[in-house]
Amino acid sequence: MKNQKLQDVIKDRYGKIARGEQTFCCPTCGPTVTDQCLAVGYTAEDLQLVPELAVLGVGCGNPTALADLKEGETVLDLGAGAGIDAFLAAKKVGQHGRVIGVDMTEDMVAKGSHLAKQHGYGNVEFRLGYIEQLPVDSGTVDVVISNCVINLTPDKLASFKEVHRVLKPGGRILIADLVTAGDLPPDVRASASAWADCLAGAMPKAAYLEAIRSAGFAAVSVVSESPYEAPGMDARLQGQIISVKVRAVKGQ
Ligand SMILES: C[S@@+](CC[C@H](N)C(=O)[O-])C[C@H]1O[C@@H](n2cnc3c(N)ncnc32)[C@H](O)[C@@H]1O
């Protein structure tokens, strides 16, 4: 499958989710968006803190809970969607900090930007762009967070190199993502729809951690991991998909 076609399918999927035309999982048999969020690690209080329309139930973790964000820091959220994690980060870094959310889907960026304005988040901005070619200056970011996004790119190493470029020396990452316990069936890997579901593009865990090291990061560690199940998931994937939260540092 050509990368451009894959990207078009992913943009189409997340555009529909941003416009409220589709939910991430089966609307009739699946859990609610709130159930999805609680299942991946958000608290009910987290969900109260952010604009309701920013909560799409498409993440696989709660990165700001683990990122140890401090007042005044600059945070970059890769694949920010409608901004759930960007808005949580904004509360933690305060008025002297700032949060930049980057996403390739126009309707996600429009939605996040609208919500930031509507709810008075003066320290959050959303930019249209690709995580493989970030619209962010080099050496300007303290912390990069991301929630269930890097699995969607065919070029994970390029994304991690970009993350390394934009971080300040000593900057850190806290990435929530899906990885695999082993190889996935070839027909799943080849399915654009399974890519958009955040499944087919998931890399084996060891290779994923190695890609982060190859991009130049030090102190790469898995903070937590748990089996990931989605309603209606192909039975052959049961036990194969892992939600990981990874921390690493850009060496001085
Ligand atoms: C599973 S959703 C997660 C959204 C958000 N992080 C959340 O938890 O609500 C994945 C998001 O990543 C974006 N995305 C996927 N691939 C991307 C890429 N290569 N560059 C920028 N954004 C991308 C999609 O448009 C979508 O909004």
Image (cartoon, rainbow, N blue to C red):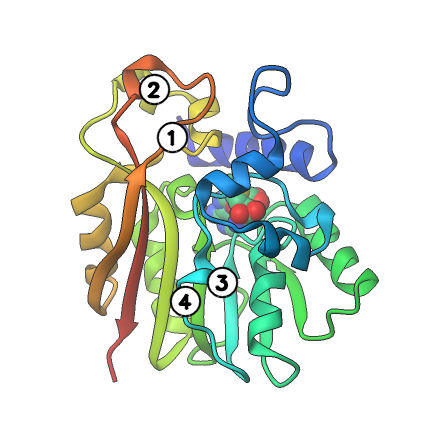
From this view, report whether residue 13 is shown above or below residue 193. Answer: below
Query: Residue drawn at (76%, 57%), measured in percent from left and top?
Result: 115
**Lower sequence index among marks 4 and 1:** 4
- CA separation in Å, label 4 and label 1: 24 Å
Mark 4 CB in 8 Å range of ligand 1?
no
Residue assigned mark 1: 199
Query: Residue drawn at (26%, 26%), measured in percent from left and top?
Result: 239
Nearer the camera: disc 1 or disc 3: 1
**Lower sequence index among marks 2 and 1:** 2
- CA separation in Å, label 4 and label 2: 32 Å
**Lower sequence index among marks 4 and 2:** 4
Nearer the camera: disc 4 or disc 1: 4
Residue assigned mark 2: 188
Nearer the camera: disc 2 or disc 3: 2
Nearer the camera: disc 3 or disc 4: 4
- CA separation in Å, label 3 and label 4: 20 Å
Residue assigned mark 4: 67
User: In the rendered structure, are the residues bearing label 2 and label 1 in contact, judged by CB atoms less than 8 Å apart?
Assistant: yes
Residue assigned mark 3: 134
